[in-house]
Amino acid sequence: MSINIWKLSTLVCGGLFVAAVGWSHIPAAQADQSEPPVAMDSCEDQGHMEAALEHLRVARHELHLAEHNKADHRVQALARTQEAINQVKKGCRFADDRRDNE
Protein backbone atom coordinates (compact mmCIF):
# COMPACT_ATOMS: atom_id res chain seq x y z
CA MET A 1 0.00 0.00 0.00
CA SER A 2 1.57 3.27 -1.09
CA ILE A 3 0.71 6.71 0.31
CA ASN A 4 0.48 9.65 -2.04
CA ILE A 5 2.98 12.29 -0.86
CA TRP A 6 0.57 15.13 -1.73
CA LYS A 7 -2.19 13.67 0.39
CA LEU A 8 0.20 13.17 3.27
CA SER A 9 1.59 16.70 3.03
CA THR A 10 -1.93 18.16 2.84
CA LEU A 11 -2.94 16.19 5.92
CA VAL A 12 0.15 17.33 7.84
CA CYS A 13 -0.32 21.00 6.83
CA GLY A 14 -3.99 20.84 7.78
CA GLY A 15 -3.11 19.38 11.15
CA LEU A 16 -0.49 22.05 11.77
CA PHE A 17 -3.00 24.76 10.85
CA VAL A 18 -5.61 23.37 13.25
CA ALA A 19 -2.98 23.12 15.99
CA ALA A 20 -1.80 26.69 15.41
CA VAL A 21 -5.35 28.06 15.54
CA GLY A 22 -6.09 26.01 18.64
CA TRP A 23 -3.00 27.22 20.47
CA SER A 24 -3.30 30.88 19.58
CA HIS A 25 -5.07 32.93 22.18
CA ILE A 26 -6.73 36.16 21.19
CA PRO A 27 -8.05 38.03 24.23
CA ALA A 28 -11.64 39.20 24.14
CA ALA A 29 -12.20 42.91 23.70
CA GLN A 30 -12.84 44.73 26.93
CA ALA A 31 -15.11 47.75 27.15
CA ASP A 32 -13.73 50.85 28.79
CA GLN A 33 -15.39 50.99 32.21
CA SER A 34 -14.43 54.60 32.91
CA GLU A 35 -17.53 56.11 31.30
CA PRO A 36 -21.08 54.80 31.02
CA PRO A 37 -22.19 53.78 27.54
CA VAL A 38 -23.97 56.39 25.47
CA ALA A 39 -27.26 55.32 23.94
CA MET A 40 -27.35 56.26 20.29
CA ASP A 41 -30.76 56.81 18.75
CA SER A 42 -32.40 54.91 21.54
CA CYS A 43 -36.09 55.11 22.18
CA GLU A 44 -35.59 54.33 25.87
CA ASP A 45 -38.70 52.51 27.05
CA GLN A 46 -40.49 52.66 23.69
CA GLY A 47 -40.13 49.02 22.71
CA HIS A 48 -42.17 49.14 19.52
CA MET A 49 -40.39 52.25 18.22
CA GLU A 50 -37.00 50.68 19.01
CA ALA A 51 -38.02 47.49 17.21
CA ALA A 52 -39.25 49.49 14.21
CA LEU A 53 -35.95 51.36 14.10
CA GLU A 54 -33.99 48.09 14.10
CA HIS A 55 -36.17 46.58 11.35
CA LEU A 56 -35.74 49.68 9.21
CA ARG A 57 -31.97 49.53 9.65
CA VAL A 58 -31.97 45.89 8.55
CA ALA A 59 -34.10 46.81 5.53
CA ARG A 60 -31.68 49.62 4.64
CA HIS A 61 -28.76 47.19 4.87
CA GLU A 62 -30.49 44.66 2.63
CA LEU A 63 -31.27 47.35 0.07
CA HIS A 64 -27.59 48.35 0.05
CA LEU A 65 -26.64 44.74 -0.62
CA ALA A 66 -29.20 44.28 -3.40
CA GLU A 67 -27.75 44.18 -6.89
CA HIS A 68 -28.75 46.46 -9.73
CA ASN A 69 -30.93 49.53 -9.46
CA LYS A 70 -34.17 47.97 -10.75
CA ALA A 71 -35.29 50.99 -12.78
CA ASP A 72 -34.47 53.38 -9.90
CA HIS A 73 -36.84 51.60 -7.47
CA ARG A 74 -33.97 50.45 -5.23
CA VAL A 75 -32.62 53.98 -4.88
CA GLN A 76 -36.09 55.31 -4.10
CA ALA A 77 -36.65 52.55 -1.53
CA LEU A 78 -33.31 53.42 0.11
CA ALA A 79 -34.26 57.09 0.31
CA ARG A 80 -37.68 56.34 1.77
CA THR A 81 -36.26 53.85 4.24
CA GLN A 82 -33.78 56.47 5.45
CA GLU A 83 -36.65 58.97 5.70
CA ALA A 84 -38.61 56.46 7.81
CA ILE A 85 -35.57 55.96 10.07
CA ASN A 86 -35.30 59.72 10.53
CA GLN A 87 -39.02 60.00 11.36
CA VAL A 88 -38.82 57.23 13.97
CA LYS A 89 -35.83 58.98 15.58
CA LYS A 90 -37.73 62.28 15.63
CA GLY A 91 -40.73 60.54 17.20
CA CYS A 92 -38.54 59.02 19.89
CA ARG A 93 -36.89 62.38 20.64
CA PHE A 94 -40.30 64.05 20.79
CA ALA A 95 -41.59 61.48 23.28
CA ASP A 96 -38.39 61.68 25.34
CA ASP A 97 -38.51 65.50 25.44
CA ARG A 98 -42.19 65.47 26.35
CA ARG A 99 -41.56 62.95 29.14
CA ASP A 100 -38.72 65.13 30.49
CA ASN A 101 -41.01 68.17 30.65
CA GLU A 102 -43.74 66.41 32.61
Image (cartoon, rainbow, N blue to C red):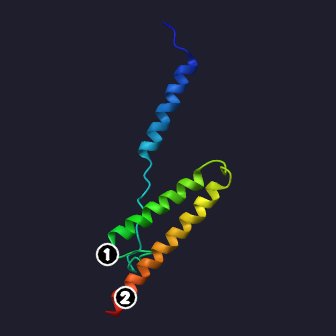
Closer to viewer: mark 2 or mark 1: 2
Please tell me which residue is depicted at 51% across the width and 68% down the height of the picture: 84
Q: Tag 1 or tag 2, which sits nearer the N-term?
A: 1
Residue 18 position by quadrant: top left
Decide: few, some or many residues near mark 2? Use Cα within 10 Å; few <14, some 14-19, many ≥20. Answer: few
* Depicted 94 relative to depicted 46: above or below: below
Please tell me which residue is depicted at 46% across the width and 43% down the height of the picture: 21
Estimate the x, y position of residue 89 in percent, counting from the top left: 46, 75
Estimate the x, y position of residue 19 in percent, counting from the top left: 44, 38
User: Dot 2: what SS?
Assistant: helix
Which residue is identified by label 2? Answer: 98
Amino acid type at mark 1: Asp
The reply to whether callout 2 and callout 1 are in contact (CB within 8 Å) is: no
* Depicted 28 relative to depicted 32: above or below: above
Residue 64 position by quadrant: bottom right
Estimate the x, y position of residue 81 in percent, counting from the top left: 54, 64
Please tell me which residue is depicted at 68% across the width and 51% down the height of the picture: 71
Real-space CA distance between mark 2 and mark 1, rounded to the nearest whole angstrom: 13 Å
Amino acid type at mark 2: Arg
Front-most of residues 62 and 20: 62
- Position of 65 with respect to 69 (left or right) is left
Residue 54 position by quadrant: bottom left
Which residue is identified by label 1? Answer: 45
Decide: few, some or many residues near mark 1? Use Cα within 10 Å; few <14, some 14-19, many ≥20. Answer: few
